[in-house]
Amino acid sequence: MTQTSYCEDESYQYLETLAEELQQVYTEMNKQLEELKEQSYELFESRVTNLLEQGRIVAEELETAKLSSNNVNCDIIQVNKIVKELKGL
């Protein structure tokens, strides 16, 4: 084997090894990317769930405030009727 062919064989072997290592790195990076996507989706889903729950709570509080406001309005009407009756005496 000549020096040139030995160097070519060695260079080829080095390139093959490098290509295998790059393939392994690429595979690992894709695996990590998929894991990050899954974690990101889970985090997004959790945040959306929390926001929906907060929205539900606010809606309940608004409904309670509305009912309370209706009760206050009824009370005001009753008081106005009593005031009119008292003024009529």
Image: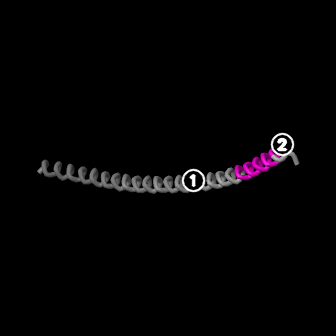
Residue interval drawn in magenta: 7-22
| Amino acid at pointer 1 | Tyr
**Cβ atoms at labels 1 and 2 below 8 Å apart:** no
Q: Say which of 30 and 47 sits in front.
A: 30
**Which label was assigned to residue 41?**
1
Q: Say which of 16 and 10 sits in front.
A: 10
43 horizontally vs 82: left or right: right
| Amino acid at pointer 2 | Thr
Q: Is residue 14 magenta?
A: yes
Residue pictured at 71% horizontal, 52% vertical? 21
Under tag 2, what secondary structure? helix
59 horizontally vs 30: left or right: left
Residue pictured at 44% horizontal, 52% vertical? 55
Q: In front: mark 1 or mark 2?
A: 2
Under tag 1, what secondary structure? helix
Quadrant of the rendered image containing residue 28: bottom right
How far is disc 1 from disc 2 in space, using C-alphas? 55 Å
Report the coloring of the rendering. one colour
Q: How many marks?
A: 2
Of label 1 and label 2, which has the lower sequence position? Answer: 2
In percent of width and height, residue 61 lies at 37, 55
Residue pictured at 68% horizontal, 50% vertical? 26
Q: Main secondary structure of the magenta part?
A: helix
84 horizontally vs 19: left or right: left
In percent of width and height, residue 64 lies at 35, 56
In percent of width and height, residue 9 lies at 82, 48
- Residue that badge 2 annotates: 4
Quadrant of the rendered image containing residue 4: top right
